Amino acid sequence: MVKKSKLALLFANILFIAGCANQMAPVGGEVDKIPPEIIESYPKDRTTNYNDNYIELKFSEYVDKLSVQNSVFISPALEHGLNYDWSGKSVTIELKDTLQKNTTYTVTIGTEVLDLNNRNKMVQPFTFAFSTGSKIDTAKISGKVYDSKVDGVMIYAYQTSGDMDVAKQKPNYVSQVGKNGSYSLVGLRDGEYKVLAIRDNMLDMLYQKNDDEFGVQSNKIELKPDNTEVEHVDFFLSKEDTIAPKLTSAFMKDRNHLVVEFSEGIDSSKLNSTNFALVDTTAKKNILPKYFYKLDSKPNQFYLAFDDTTSFKDYVLAANGFEDLHANKTESDKINFIYKAEKDTFPNKLLKAFGDMPDEKVDFERPVVKIQFADGIDLSDVSKRTTIEDARKSLVDFTTKKVDDVLFELSITSKLKTGSEYFVKFYAKDLQDLSFMNIDTVYQSKFVTSTELDFGGVSGSVESSDSTLVTVLETVNVPKRVYQQKNDPKKKFDFKKIIPGKYFVWTYRDKNKNGKYDTGIITPFKFAEDFRFYNDTLNLRARWPVGDVLIHFGEK
């Protein structure tokens, strides 16, 4: 696109203002679902000896101007910003800096560009490179970000062999992922690179710990004349969490039950009722809860159940020693709440018995039955008052484990009949709940076992000489189910008894042999573990196992 003369530009602007003084979406007709594109640019990709001070872009339709300004990334970065001069669907971008001599610049227009009609985003970033000298750098790094939401994820490349302070240091090169997560960094000079994927919420090209999600490369990257392109620099996203959880609210359902809410998800497996107390600040005494459980509460909320709280006047809930899901620990915290004197009028009871299979079936081969009560109950009462019977009333042996004070697991010691009904009975004779109501009844709940016909399967191999490979099968949608197994000596995997659904298959190098995928660390810099995805999503159906899945895990 050749730059217009001032006269031609003025004439075009007059015509444009006269004809379309206001850019408005057309009335009626079909909804616009077509994303905008860049159909022309100046300078052309791989232009050399560039000596102008502007670039030009022409879009396929009218676009939101602010979205364009927020989506232009130039590498190496310019210090003095840009000026934008619009004419219809085209924009001239003035470069305020004097460009460095004999330097390759890369321009990326990200996917946050919106059209005017229906706010459609660009599908793929648009990238081109030019050089102010007679030669242009052509090295390239490419890969993909694997995440359920890749929109807006940035790719930052730092030309360094050591650590970098990414909270203060901006990258040397910038790109952005497309709609499918793929990206490419082009026009790179030779050297060693650290590459990060960042969900940059501030869009300031700086990493904000505890806010931005990040991904770290899995191998050393060094571009040189005999190695000008590096592929499969792929990322998972994770988030650093260094902030300990807090109590955010507490309220009473009745005088026997208090709901406590935390600022984030906590590791409830490390908590029980002894981590909490009601503190009477006037009488200088405490009441300890009897039970702690989740039940039907909202995310980050839990129940505390008490025998009696009527003797209190001024109440504060105290909690100690609770951790979030990243092991950040709060030693102690307190929160006020309003007392509620109403008595609990609902007796405790067995709510249901269920399994983890679809339709809450129980696995016949390794049967574990979960039972849930309406209120807290002692493990000893569950163990001695619960039985499991088959349809012929024959008793089934099991062991009991507490998940929390309303949820228990009954692990059956032998295989069960496939596709059969079983009955959990709870004998509540002479049992009192927290309100001292006698339950005195027998509760019964039925569960059904699965069959071999309920499952699918998948088998295959990984093309690699590595002996540390682990293959993962995980559902595309919620509820999330993850199966994992170490590949056998022939690099084969074979997943049996898989619950039907759509699945991703991927393999990683378990370098430290800890049995889990490690995402890497930014500071001090630590590589993530390398991984490869199978290129198709598997739709696993019952009775139809999928075989011959081949994952190409090329050596780097």
Image: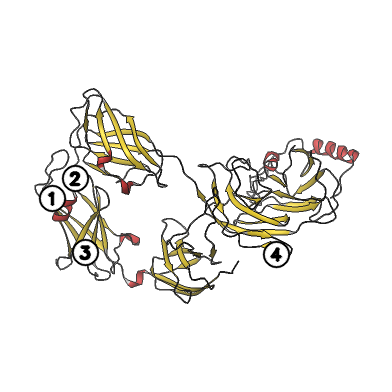
Nearest the camera: 89 or 381? Answer: 381
Cβ–Cβ under 8 Å for marks 3 and 1: no
Which label sits on residue 227?
A: 4
Q: CA distance from mark 3 to mark 1?
A: 19 Å
Q: Which one is earlier in the sequence, the residue at label 3 or at label 2?
A: 2
Q: Which one is earlier in the sequence, the residue at label 1 or at label 2?
A: 2
Q: Residue at x 30, y 66 (%)?
A: 363
Q: Considering only vertical position in the picture, is 243 above or below 111? A: above
Cβ–Cβ under 8 Å for marks 3 and 2: no
Residue 82 visible here? yes
Q: Considering only vertical position in the picture, is 458 above or below 231? A: below
Q: Which one is earlier in the sequence, the residue at label 3 or at label 1?
A: 3
Which label sits on residue 348?
A: 2
Crowding near pointer 3: few (<14 within 10 Å), some, many (20+)?
many
In the image, is 423 to the left or to the right of 167?
left
Cβ–Cβ under 8 Å for marks 4 and 1: no
Amino acid at pointer 4: Asn
In the picture, residue 247 is in which quadrant? Answer: top left
Q: Residue at x 70, y 64 (%)?
A: 227
In the image, is 313 to the left or to the right of 459?
left
Q: Count how many numbered circles sit on residues in the image.
A: 4
**Mark toward the viewer: 2 or 4:** 4
Amino acid at pointer 3: Tyr
Crowding near pointer 2: few (<14 within 10 Å), some, many (20+)?
many
In the picture, residue 456 is in which quadrant? Answer: bottom left
Q: Secondary structure at mark 1?
A: loop
Q: Which one is earlier in the sequence, the residue at label 2 or at label 4?
A: 4
Q: Which residue is mark 3?
A: 422
**Mark toward the viewer: 4 or 1:** 4
Q: Which residue is mark 1?
A: 428
Cβ–Cβ under 8 Å for marks 2 and 4: no
Q: Considering only vertical position in the picture, is 420 above or below 118? A: below
